[in-house]
Amino acid sequence: MAFENCYARRMRITFDTNCLINHFDTQSKTATSSEEIAQLLRYATSGKVSVVISTRAEADLDQDKDRIRRDRIKRNLAMFDVIGSVLRWDESKWDGGDVWADGEPGALADEIQKILFPSLKREEKRFGNKIRDVDHLVAHARDKRDIFVTDDGHLNRRADELAKFGIVVMRPGACLSYVDSIEARSVPRTLLSDALSEYHCFTLSGAISFDYSNNNGRYALGEGHFLFETQWSKAGKMSIHAYKDPSSIDGLALAKDVDDISQIVDASSYDYSSRTRTPRLGQVVVWRNANGIYAATKIIEIDDDGRGDASDRLDFEFKIAIEGKNFA
């Protein structure tokens, strides 16, 4: 499952109508996933996720013959933003946000219908319910949302096929577990280092000179949320290997487009995909720690005792970004 960086924006969720019924029909003795849905809504009200419904939610609820229950649940729809689907004469409201079914929206609806109900015929008893299921997913896909949440067993059984169209379907419990995991990773942690004090600089910027053959090549910078345990090894007199192995480090990258730390304006724009990088003299390494905070180190001098120097020594300047990604 591929999502955008979950630290960068809110998870975008679409609720199926059964989620609304299971949450708002407080008198029901058969409601499912009510606790999980309630927690997802708590995340939404705190701004940590975005939850919307499609224009078909109201149409679904209109099928309920219990007028009191129907009206009670419909009164709660105002708390949700509503996304449009394809326009259908017997379902849509003219000012409701649905779009004409020609072109891409109609083709998408046809493909989803083939997955969910390949032999669907209008004369079927539950035709309306089934076509609204299709339309919910069309709205979700057109709005490029992340997770469609439903307790509908049929939709969940078709999740793998729907995923081919970029539609991720989950039950409320699975979605909540995923959001919980994102939330746990996004909460800043106090990071601890076992580095000896002589291999640890607690400030947010400065200049370091140390023998990288000692302490397993590690030198810690900062502390707490701002801890970076840098690690280095020999590569010669003109370059040195840097590693993301310490637990406080989430990634490292080479800032090849700058000559100085102060020239970095967006630390997140670099490539953090490799375990190790090999900067040359004068180059800048950008480090991202487990809290998503950035630090930068500029290589000033490298000594190599295998090439005539008295010791293995690395000199570098560093700066930890207190806020954001800009070192300017």
Image (cartoon, rainbow, N blue to C red):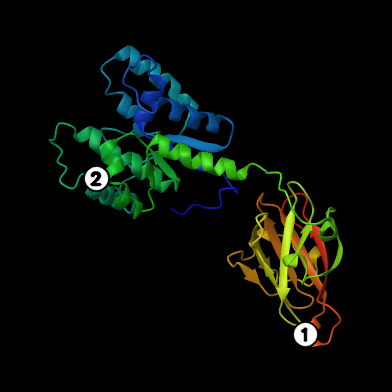
Residue 101 image point, x, y percent: 31, 46
Residue that label 2 marks: 116
Residue 234 image point, x, y percent: 72, 77
Indicate left or right for 32 with 324 as reference: left
SS at mark 1 in the image? helix
Q: How many marks?
A: 2
- Crowding at dot 2, Cα within 10 Å, few <14 / some 14-19 / many 20+, comes out as many
Q: Quadrant of the C terminus?
A: bottom right
Judge whether 284 appears above or below 177 on screen: below
Q: Nearer the viewer, residue 268 or 225?
A: 225
Residue 256 image point, x, y percent: 70, 73
Indicate left or right for 157 with 299 as reference: left
Judge whether 128 appears above or below 278 on screen: above
- What residue sits 66% from the left and 51% below the top? 292
Residue that label 1 marks: 306
Whether residue 261 is visible here, answered yes or no, is yes
- Crowding at dot 1, Cα within 10 Å, few <14 / some 14-19 / many 20+, comes out as few
Q: Nearer the viewer, residue 309 or 128?
A: 309
Considering only order in the chain, which callout, 1 or 2, is on the residue closer to the N terminus? 2
Indicate left or right for 175 with 111 as reference: right
SS at mark 2 in the image? helix
- What residue sits 78% from the left and 70% below the top? 212
Q: Amino acid at mark 1?
A: Gly
Q: Residue furthest bottom?
A: 308
Give residue 29's quadrant in the image: top left
